[in-house]
Amino acid sequence: MVKGISLLLVAVAPLFAWLQGGVTGLGWGVAAVAALGWLSASRRQRLSDRSAAAGRALSNSAPTKEQQQLDRWLRLLDAAPVALVEVQRGGVLWANATARQWLALDPQRHAGRPVLWFLPYPSWWEEVRKSRDGMTGAWQRDGEPIVWRLRWLGQSSGSDDDGVLWIEDWTERQRVEAMRRDFVANVSHELRTPLTVLIGALETLSERDFPLDPQLRSDLIAQCERQGQQMLRLVRDLLQLAELEGGAPPAKGWVTVVELIDEACEVGAALAPEGLTVTAELPESLASAELYADATEIASALHNLVSNAVRYTPPPGEITIGATERDGRLVLFVADTGIGIAEEHIPRLTERFYRVDRARSRASGGTGLGLAIVRHIADRHEALLSITSALGKGSRFALEFREGTWRQRAGARGR
């Protein structure tokens, strides 16, 4: 019993930390070994108690304090966010809910069966037991890649095949890590081009061995300015993305739809070259509509959509900025008669640095982050970003706000 109590004390700290959201990974493994060790001791103790109390009806006996503690720890371990399998002599003895789901395990039906039977690859069993730091294994489920982190937490006494197999799903972690690597590579690439041009122009300007033609000097200075502005836009968009992803919640308030449309039209008119028409489209029924949103963020989203429309709509062409109501939802949209987008590119348009035409985007001052910013703003407002396009006919980008996030200012039709 002393051994059981000591193991219980070891388990208490990480388990209660988990309840407060503070333990993942190895902390759970330590907790599992301690708690399952205590559970094993409790099982032995209960068998001894049954022998000593032979003839007493169990149905008439009140649960002991230790049995209550045992049930409590079992519930805690069963709810753990990692897979835990207690193994005895290489066979399944107990498994929590996560392990039962991930490994298709039924501890009662599969009791004593080799645990390696239930792993995606049986060879993982030997590999994880030989590794001091655990192992990472990748496999596929229904065509989707899955990454698991496995550790073997053996008991100090008993068979080498006695212990706890601990499995954590690292799929999302690996995906995020891959995104981080891609992001760093993309940022480096995006900065390298303007920096190379900028440094080359400055080196030419600094040459004293021969005089520069005034026109060439002006062109080089203008080139430096363009590349500097491009880097400034990139840094600004990166900072905005960082703020949207990890900053404070949007500062929402009631903003009139007319103001949002008018401001977006002003931006479009300022950016549009000669021959490109920018018009507003707002039905009378929405003339007094208000949206509960962060005005700065929504204006930024519309600004990015309008900038893209100007960039990919050669004159003569038309850009329409407006609002409509559909099935109780308020829809803000930017439509153009531009070059359009091939269907296969549409699902990836909101990825960072994804460009259909890289050369055209850079030449027109695009950073490849505009639609990623729009998507984040939509997510922060529980709105849907929809994209429809056809090559040679144009594109339509729309932000759809659910019912309850907008209203009529005059109260004619409350939302």
Image (cartoon, grey):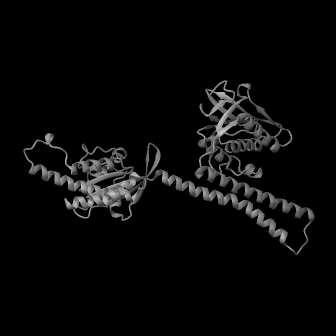
* Residue 218 percent across, percent down from the top left: 88, 62
Vertical arrangement, residue 278 with respect to residue 171, above or below: above
**Residue, x 92% and y 64% (percent of image)?**
214
> Is residue 269 among the parts visible in the rendering?
yes
**Residue, x 84% and y 68% (percent of image)?**
205
Q: Residue furthest front?
A: 410
Left or right position of 299 against 121: right
* Residue 333 percent across, percent down from the top left: 70, 35
Left or right position of 52 against 213: left
In this rendered view, identify the residue nearer to me: 78 or 58.
58
The N terminus lies in quadrant:
bottom left
In this rendered view, identify the residue nearer to me: 199 or 140.
199
**Residue, x 39% and y 55% (percent of image)?**
17
In this rendered view, identify the residue nearer to me: 111 or 241.
241
**Residue, x 8% and y 47% (percent of image)?**
54
Vertical arrangement, residue 73 with respect to residue 200, above or below: above
* Residue 204 percent across, percent down from the top left: 83, 68
Vertical arrangement, residue 29 with respect to residue 54, above or below: below
* Residue 4 percent across, percent down from the top left: 23, 58
Q: Residue furthest left?
A: 55
